[in-house]
Image: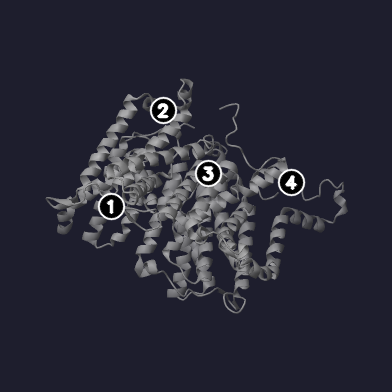
């Protein structure tokens, strides 16, 4: 279980020699040993990579009977994974809540779209620019990180509202409520991604290659000095400060990084959708991203992937239900009415019964052989 | 500039009316914060329920308006109580992060529930007495008198509750020190329940005097404005909310009015004003306009 902070700290790192097999270190040549150590550190990445690489081979065949265009949905999962893993660094690791990350997602989308539409940038330059602009904006509003807990949550909620109003009202730039249309499809120099017969599959690979790189980066980041500093300040800011952690700077780093990743996700999103308007980037998106982090599992890189997958697939599954069951009660038909009820219930129930999220809950279940659920009504000896 | 001055009384009247709503919502935030240490992100949704329940009872069910309003306030209080028992009580030992996310979840849940039952964008909640009257420089709806009157009554009732009743005093004790309150025999968990019922009822009252319109989407806006008002007045200072609400209500009319009439900025930016005030106050004067500096215990 490399993916989760607590477990990883428990397991001693022993230079990659397989334990429990009784092998002497000399049995492997040093290059084979280092290869083994890489495989052991990154086995989850390799597993996910292999799964994702093979996924389109069988996905198309079962998409039709399932009624869900799997490759298409997985593109979105990839995009949300990028944003959610950044937000998880901020919320899960550094312990700073943001209810306004849709703003950075939206700013990224608008930056890349506007650069491509008005300045005729190619998308592969527009998206890095989106990352840069989101990061700069994140740095500009970073003073809100002086606030803590509830105050920070409310202030970021307010920030999200301010950005939304500006996206809507700066009609000369953003087109207001009408949004921007005809955003060019993705392409790299010499490689058209968003065109051709199987453009979905090409976009899918493009997005997931980036997502895996981001995951790899974050996976290593949380094991670096910075990552440990974030965990430390999550536990106790005073203790972290005493131990020599520059608390405010670490918070700013986490915030700017999460803003940049949200901008990256937004930039890609604009190009695969081809159309954006401010109503895509409201508080609803912010809450969706937070739901992904929380449901997937805070303080866990893999939680972001699981959360993005679950939250993105739920609406698609509900939409496909009539196809599976033949007939459903008519109240289920308009999913959009119930979307909020489902998200709200998921958030509340997760917090009450599985406060560590899916990945952490299941990992603990496997490791400590206990129920992944907590019983909030159990009387404690010390009330 | 002249236009702005001519409109000034109108801005004052509108600002006062909105300010009264913010006072009620902000008091709800403060009451819950004092007895549980939680900021209830679903506070705005209580107002939504207040408005929509009144619509359901007065228009759909045809009850007389005062009765409908009273029942709506009680029903909203019951929603608050249910929320406390089902969600806040189980999470009473959880951290700040958990509480924030859970109440955000509750807010989304309530909003969607409202949307399922009342799906239109706006419902016309009947005014207590329709019509308008003229003051020098401003046209004011008669509802304005009801809004101010009911707000004064609510604030007075809350004041009496906190200063005269046993439960009110116990809740004040909780706000000072929950552990010490437990030691002198106060049932802290029950005080948390009372605070949610009271806050929800106040929010519901705000929602129904917000006539003529109610909709499922009104909660977020009124919630963030109510919170801004409570921060301006000093979070945890129940009666600071009165000052905070009025200041916010007036600023929120005067600033966009000034920008629009004098500088020609679109009125669409009005939605950002309270959020900017919120962030500015949190950053530069977190103890509120009235509060003294706060020392944090570490």
Q: Secondary structure at mark 3?
A: loop
Q: Residue A224 at x, y = what percent? A: 63, 49
The residue tagged 1 is: B212
The residue tagged 3 is: A246
Sequence-wise, the earlier of marks 1 and 2 is 2
Which label number is shown at residue B176?
Answer: 2
Which residue does the image show at 69% across and 43% down from the upper left? A365
Of labels 3 and 1, the one closer to you: 1
The residue tagged 4 is: A13
Q: Secondary structure at mark 1?
A: loop
User: How far apart are the alpha carbons under marks 1 and 4?
Assistant: 66 Å
Is disc 1 surrounded by few (<14), some (14 to 19) or many (20+) residues within 10 Å? some
Which residue does the image show at 38% across and 66% down from the upper left? A177
The front one of A283 and B85 is B85
Give the chain of mark 2. Answer: B
- Which color scheme does this rendered protein use? one colour
- Where does the C terminus of chain A fall, quadrant-wise? top right
User: How far apart are the alpha carbons under marks 4 and 3?
Assistant: 27 Å
Give the total of numbered labels.
Answer: 4
User: How far apart are the alpha carbons under marks 2 and 4?
Assistant: 48 Å
Q: Secondary structure at mark 4?
A: loop
Give the chain of mark 4. Answer: A
User: How far apart are the alpha carbons under marks 3 and 2?
Assistant: 33 Å
Of labels 2 and 4, the one closer to you: 2
The front one of B38 and B278 is B38
Q: Residue A346 at x, y = what percent? A: 55, 49
Is disc 4 surrounded by few (<14), some (14 to 19) or many (20+) residues within 10 Å? few
> In this rendering, would B71 be left or right of A57?
left
């Amino acid at each position: 279980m490399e993916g989760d902070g607590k477990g990883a700290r428990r397991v001693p790192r022993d230079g990659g020699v397989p334990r429990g097999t009784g092998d002497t270190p000399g049995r492997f040549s040093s290059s084979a040993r280092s290869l083994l150590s890489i495989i052991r550190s990154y086995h989850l990445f390799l597993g996910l990579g292999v799964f994702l690489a093979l996924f389109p081979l069988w996905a198309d065949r079962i998409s039709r009977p399932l009624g869900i265009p799997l490759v298409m949905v997985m593109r979105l999962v990839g995009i949300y994974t990028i944003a959610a893993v950044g937000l998880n660094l901020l919320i899960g690791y550094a312990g700073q809540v943001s209810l306004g990350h849709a703003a950075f997602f939206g700013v990224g989308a608008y930056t890349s779209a506007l650069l491509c539409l008005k300045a005729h940038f190619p998308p592969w330059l527009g998206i890095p620019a989106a990352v840069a602009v989101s990061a700069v904006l994140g740095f500009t509003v970073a003073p809100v990180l002086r606030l803590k807990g509830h105050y920070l949550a409310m202030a970021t909620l307010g920030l999200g509202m301010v950005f939304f109003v500006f996206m809507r009202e700066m009609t000369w730039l953003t087109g207001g409520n009408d949004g921007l249309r005809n955003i060019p499809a993705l392409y790299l120099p010499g490689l058209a991604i968003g065109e051709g017969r199987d453009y979905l599959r090409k976009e899918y690979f493009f997005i997931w290659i980036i997502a895996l790189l981001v995951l790899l980066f974050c996976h290593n980041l949380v094991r670096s000095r910075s990552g440990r500093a974030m965990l430390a300040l999550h536990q106790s800011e005073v203790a972290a400060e005493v131990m020599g952690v520059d608390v405010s700077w670490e918070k700013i780093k986490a915030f700017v990084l999460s803003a940049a990743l949200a901008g990256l996700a937004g930039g890609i999103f604009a190009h695969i959708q081809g159309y954006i308007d401010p109503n895509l980037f409201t508080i609803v998106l912010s809450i969706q991203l937070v739901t992904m982090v929380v449901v997937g599992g805070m303080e866990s890189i893999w939680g972001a992937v699981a959360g993005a997958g679950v939250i993105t697939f739920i609406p698609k599954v509900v939409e496909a239900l009539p196809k599976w069951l033949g007939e459903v009660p008519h109240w289920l038909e308009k999913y959009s009415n119930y979307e909020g009820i489902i998200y709200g219930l998921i958030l509340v129930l997760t917090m009450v019964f599985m406060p560590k999220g899916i990945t952490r809950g299941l990992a603990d279940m496997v490791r400590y052989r206990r129920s992944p659920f907590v019983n909030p009504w159990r009387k404690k000896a010390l009330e | 500039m002249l236009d702005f001055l001519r409109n000034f009384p109108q801005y004052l009247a509108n600002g006062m009316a909105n300010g009264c709503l913010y006072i009620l919502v902000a008091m709800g935030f403060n009451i819950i914060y004092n007895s549980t240490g939680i900021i209830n992100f679903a506070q705005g949704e209580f107002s939504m329920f207040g408005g929509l329940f009144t619509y359901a009872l007065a228009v759909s069910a045809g009850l007389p308006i005062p009765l409908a309003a009273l029942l709506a306030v009680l029903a909203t209080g019951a929603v608050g109580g249910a929320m406390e028992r089902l969600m806040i009580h189980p999470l009473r030992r959880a951290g700040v992060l958990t509480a924030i996310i859970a109440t955000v979840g509750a807010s989304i849940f309530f909003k969607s529930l409202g949307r399922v039952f009342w799906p239109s964008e706006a419902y016309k909640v009947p005014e207590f007495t329709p019509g308008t009257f003229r003051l020098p420089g401003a046209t004011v709806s008669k509802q304005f008198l009801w809004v101010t009157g009911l707000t004064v009554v609510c604030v007075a009732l809350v004041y009496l509750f906190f200063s005269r009743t046993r439960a009110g005093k116990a809740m004040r004790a909780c706000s000072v020190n929950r552990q010490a309150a437990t030691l002198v025999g106060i049932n802290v968990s029950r005080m948390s329940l009372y605070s949610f019922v009271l806050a929800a009822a106040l929010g519901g009252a705000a929602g129904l005097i917000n006539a003529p319109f109610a909709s499922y989407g009104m909660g977020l806006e009124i919630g963030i404005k109510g919170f801004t008002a409570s921060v301006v007045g000093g979070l945890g200072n129940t009666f600071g909310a009165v000052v905070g609400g009025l200041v916010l209500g007036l600023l929120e009319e005067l600033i966009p009015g000034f920008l629009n009439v004098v500088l020609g900025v679109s009125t669409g930016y009005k939605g950002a004003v309270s959020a900017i005030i919120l962030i500015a106050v949190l950053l530069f004067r977190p103890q509120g306009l009235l509060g003294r500096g706060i020392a944090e215990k570490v």
